[in-house]
């Protein structure tokens, strides 16, 4: 009698379905998001990067 191989994907799927059925969907956003998105990146010194407008993804 061969031992049954453990199926990781099936186990993860079962645990997600059990959480959803228990009323705890894993996709709930636990933060508020009131400030309008992520801040621009800063250098290690805390100073903002300076880029030309044509280089910025935010123009």
Image (spheres, helix red, strand yellow):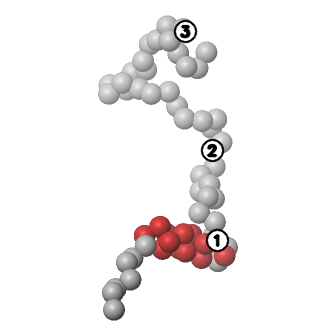
**Residue 41 or residue 9, whichever sits in front:** 9
Residue 49 spot, x, y in % from top left? 42, 18
**Residue 12 or residue 46, whichever sits in front:** 12
**Residue 21 or residue 29, whichever sits in front:** 21
- The disc label shown at residue 20, or none: 1
Residue 52 spot, x, y in % from top left? 49, 7
- The disc label shown at residue 43, or none: none
Mark 2 lies on a secondary structure that is loop
Give the residue drawn at x 64%, y 71%: 20
Q: Is residue 48 left or right of residue 21?
A: left
Question: How far is disc 1 from disc 3 in space, using C-alphas?
Answer: 45 Å
Residue 19 higher or lower than 44, as above or below = below
| Number of other residues with Cα within 10 Å of mark 3, as a class: few under 14, some 14 to 19, many 20 or more | few
Mark 2 vs mark 3: give the one in front.
3
Give the quadrant of the N terminus.
bottom left
Using the rendered image of the protein, determine whether residue 35 is visible from the camera's viewpoint: yes
Mark 1 lies on a secondary structure that is helix
- The disc label shown at residue 33, or none: 2
């Amino acid at each position: 009698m061969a031992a049954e191989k453990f199926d990781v994907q099936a186990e993860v799927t079962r645990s997600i379905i059990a959480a959803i059925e228990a009323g705890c969907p894993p996709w709930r956003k636990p933060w508020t998001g009131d400030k309008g998105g992520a801040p621009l990146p800063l250098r290690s010194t805390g100073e903002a990067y300076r880029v030309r407008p044509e280089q910025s993804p935010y123009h």
